[in-house]
Amino acid sequence: MVQTQVIDCNFVYEICRKHFENFNIILKFPKNTPPHLTYQWRFIKILTNKFVKWNFTIEEIDLFINIAIKKRYVQLKTRGLSVLNDSDIIDECYTEVKNHENVENQDIVLLKNTHQWLIKQLKNDSAVEHLINRRKPGSFTNITTYYQSGYLVKLYIAFSKSCCTALELLSQRCPEEREKCPSTSALYFIRHYQNQSILPQIKEILGSDSYV
C-alpha cells in the first residue's frame, strides 16, 4: 500500500493533538502568537524531522506518539509536547516501534505458513468438515489436535471463519473438548483489538476464509 499522506509538522501536530485529547488534555498555543513561532511548534518540528529521517510510515508515527504519551502521561499537563523530545523517550519509543514491526512481520509469516499447511491437510474435504472430524473414534477432533500440537495458533484460529465455525460446532457437540481450545472471548479480543495494523495482510492470506 503506497503512502500518500505528506509527513509534515501540521500532520504530526494533528496526531499529537488527537492522542492528547484521548487523555483529556487540550493542546493550546499562546494567545497572539503565530503557532510556528512557539516552543510547542519547535518541538513538533524536531519530532517531524526525526520521523522523516527514519522514514516512518503513518502507522509508525501514530504508534510512536501513543507509546511516548503513555510513558510520560504524568508530565503531559505541565510539559506538553516537550515530553516527546526527551532523548530517553525518543530512544525507547523508536526501539518499541521497531520491535512491534518485527513481531508483526513474524505474525504474517506464521499466518502464511499455517494457512499453507492447513490447505495441504484438507485434501478433498471442506475446511470445516476436516477440522471437526476425528482421525479415529474416541480421539480429539482435528482442530483440537492441531491446536494442542501447535500447528494451529490462536491468531490463525481467530481470523479464520472455518476455524471459528468448527469451534461453534464443537461447543454444541462436545462442550468438554471445546474448553481445550481458545475461548470465544479470547478469539474476539484478538480479532477486534490486536493485530489491527496487519488486517490487510491477514485478509490477503486467508482470502474468503478471513474473518475481517
Image: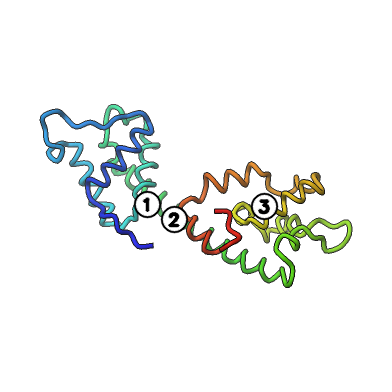
The part of the image, by quadrant, that contains residue 145 is bottom right
The x and y percentages for residue 151 are 68, 61
Q: Earlier in the sequence, mark 3 or mark 1?
A: 1
Q: Which residue is mark 2?
A: 101
> Label 2 neighbourhood size at 10 Å, few (<14), some (14-19), many (20+)?
some
Q: Is residue 200 above or below residue 10?
A: below
Residue 194 placement, left or right of 176: left
Q: Which mark is in front, 3 or 2?
A: 3
- Relative placement, left or right, of 106 versus 136 is left
Helix, strand or loop under label 3: helix
Q: According to the image, label 3 marks what residue? A: 164
Question: Relative to 185, does residue 130 appear above or below in the rendering?
Answer: below
Q: Which mark is residue 60?
A: 1
Look at the numbered disc 2 and give the secondary structure of its residue.
helix
Which of the two labelled residues, at mark 1 and mark 2, occupies the earlier sequence position?
1
**Is 61 located above or below residue 114 in the figure?**
above
Furthest-right residue in view?
137
Does residue 108 appear left or right of residue 55 in this picture?
right
**Residue 34: x and y, percent?**
12, 36
The residue carrying pointer 3 sits among few (fewer than 14), some (14 to 19) or many (20 or more) residues within 10 Å by Cα, namely some
